[in-house]
Amino acid sequence: MIATAEVSVSSRNWSTNLKCIVERYHADTAAGGGENCAVSPSQADIDAMSKPARNASARTRASEDDTDVTSPFLGNGLAWLRAAWVLAAGGLAIVALALASFNSADPPTTAVAIPNSPPLNLCGKFGAAIAHRAYELFGIGVWMPICYIGTLLAFFAVGRPMTHPFVRLIGACVMMVAVGGLHNEWFPSIGPVTGYQAGIVPMSLSLELHEHFGVGASLLFLMMLGVGAIVMADTIVAMLPAALANSFEFLSPIWKTDWSSATASLRERFSSIFPQPALATPTRTPRARRTAAA
């Protein structure tokens, strides 16, 4: 507050001095026709003196906006956003930790007769219940929305805007169902929850598609996965072809080599090492030709 007061006083002094100079200039001009003016500042002088005053006023306003007196916690929207970000990040961390430490023998499981007591999940009974329900409904594809929400919170933390966050969330949900469907098509006997290895929602959709399309159900789920990836992370998907091409750059000598000339050189070398024997070709004498003609 002391710094703010000093800046404010300095701003008022500059403004007062400038006002006095301008008033004296106009008064002398009116009295003597502009010939005997005691003070005759030019426009450049006035601008030069008014610039520090404007800068001081701007600094005053900025320092007043940053003080807690004029922007308390309850009235500052940015503070509420920060508090919401902390709550969302904490909740996401709890859910992710619960999913990562899931144990199929923790309650409310039905896979074993005697569940673990206490649960082995790092988040206790609450984490065990959350993880069990999530895996039971959506399977391992539930990690797709988790990863997206974590990326969204990271973008908010570094101050980078993300366009269409809710539309991208829909893309993450589509990817979640597609991953679960592919899981049920390719690895139906492997999964975190016994009886619902791929999740209830993906398994139901997979059974319906497999009944109508057979093996083509896997292709449909791959298409869903691609569409969801484009909706959720279009920029990253657009960069994948170039990234894959760069990752195989170390194989460039293979397809840039002139294999035809190398093969011809190798053939010549083998022929010099293992020469072919000369074959005698029969020649026909003139007598033999006359005999054959007769």
Image: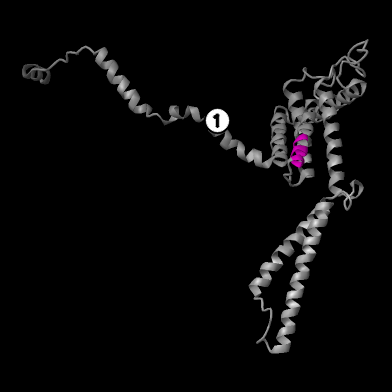
Q: How is the image coloured?
A: one colour
Q: Secondary structure at mark 1?
A: helix
Q: Quadrant of residue 171?
A: top right
- The quarter of the displayed image where residue 283 is located: top left
Residue 24 position (above or below residue 82):
below
- Relative horizontal placement of residue 232, taking residue 271 as reference (left or right): right
Task: Residue at 86%, 18% (x, y): give it.
Answer: 121
Examine the residues drawn in magenta and state their main secondary structure: helix
The amino acid beneath tag 1 is: Ser
Mark 1 nearby-residue class (10 Å; few <14, some 14–19, many ≥20):
few
Query: Looking at the image, can residue 166 be seen?
Result: yes
Q: Nearer the viewer, residue 86 or 204?
A: 86
Magenta part of the chain: 150-157
Residue 220 is covered by the magenta coloring: no
Q: Position of residue 222 (x, y in %)?
A: 69, 32
Q: Nearer the viewer, residue 58 or 266?
A: 58
Residue bearing mark 1: 247
Residue at image location 62% in from the left, 40% down from the top: 238
- Residue in view at x 70 percent, y 37 percent: 229
Residue 28 point in image, percent of width and height:
72, 84
User: In x, y percent, where is residue 61?
Assistant: 80, 58
Q: Is residue 200 visible?
A: no
User: Which quarter of the figure is the C terminus placed in?
Assistant: top left
Compared across the picture, whether 44 is left or right of 249 comes to right
